[in-house]
Image (tube, grey):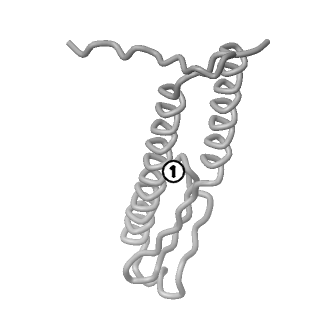
Amino acid sequence: MTGLADSLITRVLKQRDLMQAMDEHCKTISARVTSRDQNVSVEVDGYGAMTGLWLGPNAYALGADPLAALIVETAQVAAKVAADRQAHLTEQFAQRMRELHRAPLTRWDGTAFERAEPAND
């Protein structure tokens, strides 16, 4: 295979590599947030699932209901941080995929084949 087919295969391989990198990065996303009063720290994974909970020495003095509310509030903030990281990563991924998709393919003689952009109606 030469020319356009090779160029297309190269693009597909780059897209595959980008998707694998995205998957690996998504698996490593985590966020740890500590409440303002330092009584609760929560760590979540990239999906917002709690992976760690730490209570400060004064946490129990808050009482059960206020402590529970503080844990939930802190976990929600941590999940938002993780979601923001995921969104940023997803946007970067989408941008790079668009760039790969728009890149011209090269024919066997070195000339470029560029895809015609559809008209926006």
Q: Which amino acid type corresponds to the residue marked 1 in the rendered image?
A: Gly
Q: Is residue 115 left or right of residue 66?
A: right
Residue 33 rendering spot, x and y as whole percentages: 47, 70
Image quadrant containing the N terminus: top right
- Give 116 or 29, whichever is nearer the viewer: 116
Q: Residue at x 58, y 20 (%)?
A: 111
Q: Secondary structure at mark 1?
A: loop
Relative vertical location of residue 5 with respect to residue 24 in this rendering, above or below: above
Report the front residue among 7 and 90.
7
- The quarter holding residue 77 reads bottom left
The spot of residue 117 in percent (x, y) is 37, 17
Determine the residue located farthest toward the left in the rendered image.
121
Q: Which residue is identified by label 1?
A: 48
Q: Residues within 10 Å of mark 1 (few under 14, many from 20)?
A: many
Quarter occupied by the C terminus: top left
- Looking at the image, residue 50 lies above or below residue 58: above
Q: Left of 18 or right of it: where is 64?
A: left
> Which of 88/97 is in front?
97
Q: Residue at x 54, y 87 (%)?
A: 57
Picture coordinates of residue 68, whole percent (x, y): 43, 65
Instruction: Find residue 44 and report its horizontal and vertical position in percent.
Output: 55, 58
39 up-or-down from 71: above or below: below
Q: Quadrant of residue 23?
A: top right
Task: Farthest residue to the bottom: give it.
Answer: 57
Q: How many marks?
A: 1
- Between residues 68 and 64, which one lies in front from this camera angle? 68
Q: Residue at x 58, y 67 (%)?
A: 53
Instruction: Please report the residue visible at 33 percent of the width from the left and 13 percent of the height from the top.
Output: 118
Residue extending furthest right? 1
